[in-house]
Image: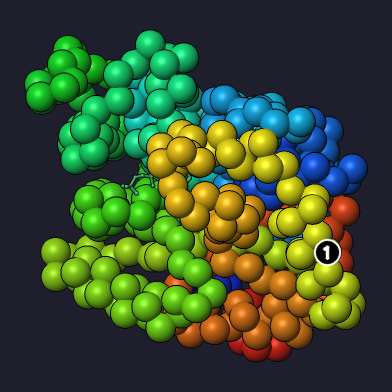
Amino acid sequence: MSAGRYQMYNNNSFKLGLFGANCSSGRAINKLPERWLADWDSCATMAKIADDAGIDFILPIGRWKGYGGPTNFQGTTYETVTWATGLLAQTSRITIFGTVHAPMFNPLVAAKQMVTADHIGKGRFALNVVVGWNEPEFDMFGEQQRPHETRYQYAEEWISAIKKMWTNPDAFDVNERFLHLKNVVSEPKPFNGTTPFIMNAAASDVGRNFALHHCHGFFTSFREFDVQKATGAVSSIKKQALDIGREIDVYTQGHVVCRPTRREAEEYFHYFTTEGADFEAVEQILRLKNVTRENTPDFDARMKAVPLGNIGYPLIGTPDDVAAKLKSINDAGLSGIAFSLVNYVKELPFLAQELLPRLARLGMRAA
Ligand SMILES: Cc1cc2nc3c(=O)[nH]c(=O)nc-3n(C[C@H](O)[C@H](O)[C@H](O)COP(=O)(O)O)c2cc1C
């Protein structure tokens, strides 16, 4: 049976994606001279290399405001649906996500933008829904952030309305707690009578429950030492999905530093997460989470942990090391990983040449 859009049109049992390239510095809070600037030409070059190499997907971050510091970490960002649309036009195989803040996008505008992207990409657009958390971003939109649980109640109405816009042939009304839409029509439908893969990025149980009921994928974080925990979490969510007649894939996030020798990889990783990190931006990230020097006794330790914690699962080492780590994530039941690089264009060719063939030999991808 040929693989459909929910398998990203291939039979790779473990999907690899590039994460965060629409934002300056990607996900590494660094001030290295080669840091990622996220300019359009670099993004387009990255997408082309990834498409040719057989990387499965590209996943942007929904980010609206930088964190300050000398680099203004993630201060230059492309809006993700338009970014995906441009990249879909220039690629032919790879799936490209938009990461869309449900509370900030009118559902009808979002539904139609995504259909446009999907037609341009001939069915390769996918949606990563986020409910948001960053107060200064909400302030820029003039929006009040809802209490945690209510954010997901809103998101349920939002995604349900969008699914109807994508599939209902007839006009319909939406009369819910938050959304009141009259006589809604939306044509064209997504590409070829199918609808996009939908993922939700979250960490909480409420977010997980939202994904379980409304999405095809759950995108969450596991640390390196959590592989055992990941196995339990993945099998439990998959079982809960089956119990309600659904299927769900679990994806995680990480950062790759892959070099010919382990020492080179480890030294580079150590450098950009310590001396090479932008600690002014780190301080602002913590402040947004209400962690300050004044209210936190071990503040310095918390500061040091952020450049490491921010990038998720660290995949550091030789091509053999990174392949072995990915295999352990796959063995834990995860369906894929979205990873960042300090410089996507500079580092991708080595991965294409050295890492992907190893993953094929481990049975995780087609040769
Ligand atoms: C893997 C992962 C990726 C995320 N990506 C984004 C993002 O791109 N933009 C954003 O504003 N929030 C992002 N978030 C945050 C979530 O949207 C959510 O606001 C946050 O996890 C808090 O909600 P929760 O308590 O339900 O997890 C991400 C969260 C996770 C776990």
Residue drawn where x is 68% and y is 80% of the image: 323
Kind of residue sitting beneath label 1: Tyr
Above or below, 175 against 6 in this view is above
Residue drawn where x is 76% and y is 64% of the image: 269
Give the residue at mark 1: 268
Which residue sits furthest bottom? Answer: 362
Indicate left or right for 110 with 262 as reference: left
Mark 1 Cβ and ligand 1 under 8 Å apart: no
Question: Is there any visible trace of residue 134 in the rendered image?
Answer: yes
Indicate left or right for 229 with 239 as reference: right
Image position, residue 308 (x, y; %): 62, 59
User: Image quadrant of ligand 1?
Assistant: top left
Residue drawn where x is 48% and y is 35% of the image: 287
SS label for mark 1: helix
Above or below, 239 against 257 in this view is below
Image position, residue 303 (x, y; %): 58, 50
Indicate left or right for 330 with 202 as reference: right
Image position, residue 55 (x, y; %): 68, 61
Pick whichever, 82 or 65, lies toward us. Answer: 65
Indicate left or right for 73 with 352 as reference: left
